[in-house]
Amino acid sequence: MATLRRAGDPALVSDPATIAEVLAGLGVILETLPVPTDGQTLALLAAPELDDAEQARLLEGLDGVFQRLQTEKGYQERDLVVLYPGHPQLETLNTRFHRIHTHDDEEVRYIVDGEGVFGFVLPDDSQVELTVVAGDYIHVPSHVEHWFRLNQRQRIKAVRYFSARGGWTPLYTDRPLQEFAHP
C-alpha cells in the first residue's frame, strides 16, 4: 500500500482516500492491482537480478494487465525495469531521475516487487513524495512535474507501459527539490 509524505512534514499519510485527493489535482491515478502468485512468477519476483529470458518470462506472467491496458488505454509496448543493490547503473539511473522533470507522454508503472518513491510538484508549488510498493499501479499524466528515486532498500521491479517510446524522454525543469524527512 502506497504512503505519502509532504515536504517539511515528518507525518506519513497511508489513507488511500487522502492520497487520492492529494494526487487528483495533478490527474495522477494510483490503483492497486494484485500481483500474480503462481509459482514461476513468485520465483522470478524473489530473485534480485533477472536476465533477459527471465524478464521476458515475468512479463508474460503479467500479460493480463498489459492486454487490459492495450484495450482500455491503447498502450503498445511494455518493458521491465529491474533495479537492485549492485546494479551496474544504479547510481547513474538514480541521479538521472531524482531531478524534477516532465515528459511529453504519460508515465505508467506497475510495481511488482520492491518499492520506489515518486515525487510531485503540486499546483500550489508544494511537493510530496509517494512511496509505491508491489501491487501499486501509477499513471502520471504528461507534463506533470515529478521525479523518481529509490529508497533505502534500492530494489524495485516495475513494468513500464508506453503508447510511444519517443515521448518518454525526461525534460528537466531545474526546479529545486524541497526537503523531506526520510526514516
Image (cartoon, rainbow, N blue to C red):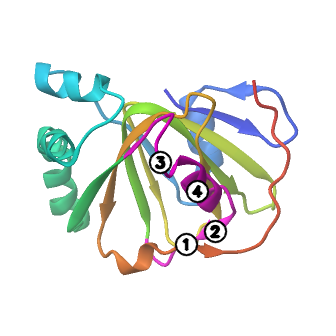
Q: Is residue 69 above or below residue 145?
A: above
Residue 65 tag number = none
Kindly identify the residue that appears in the image at 68 percent across and 43 percent down.
Answer: 129
Residue 170 tag number = 1
The local crowd at label 4, few if under 14, some if 14 to 19, many if 20 or more residues have their Cα within 10 Å, is few
Any part of residue 163 in sight = yes
Highlighted magenta segment, given as a residue range:
82-105
Q: How many marks?
A: 4
Q: Is residue 127 above or below residue 8?
A: below
Quick one: label 4 or label 2, which is nearer the N terminus? 4
Spot occupied by residue 76 in the image (x, y as percentages of width and height): 20, 68
Any part of residue 25 in sight = no
Which residue is disc 2 drawn over?
Answer: 101
Spot occupied by residue 177 in the image (x, y as percentages of width and height): 80, 56
Element at badge 3? loop
Element at badge 4? helix
Quick one: label 3 or label 2, which is nearer the N terminus? 3
Quick one: label 4 or label 1, which is nearer the N terminus? 4
Mark 4 → mark 3, Cα distance in angstroms: 9 Å
Q: Which amino acid type is shown beneath numbered disc 2?
A: His
Q: Is residue 81 above or below residue 12?
A: below
Q: Which amino acid type is shown beneath numbered disc 4?
A: Thr
Residue 88 tag number = 3
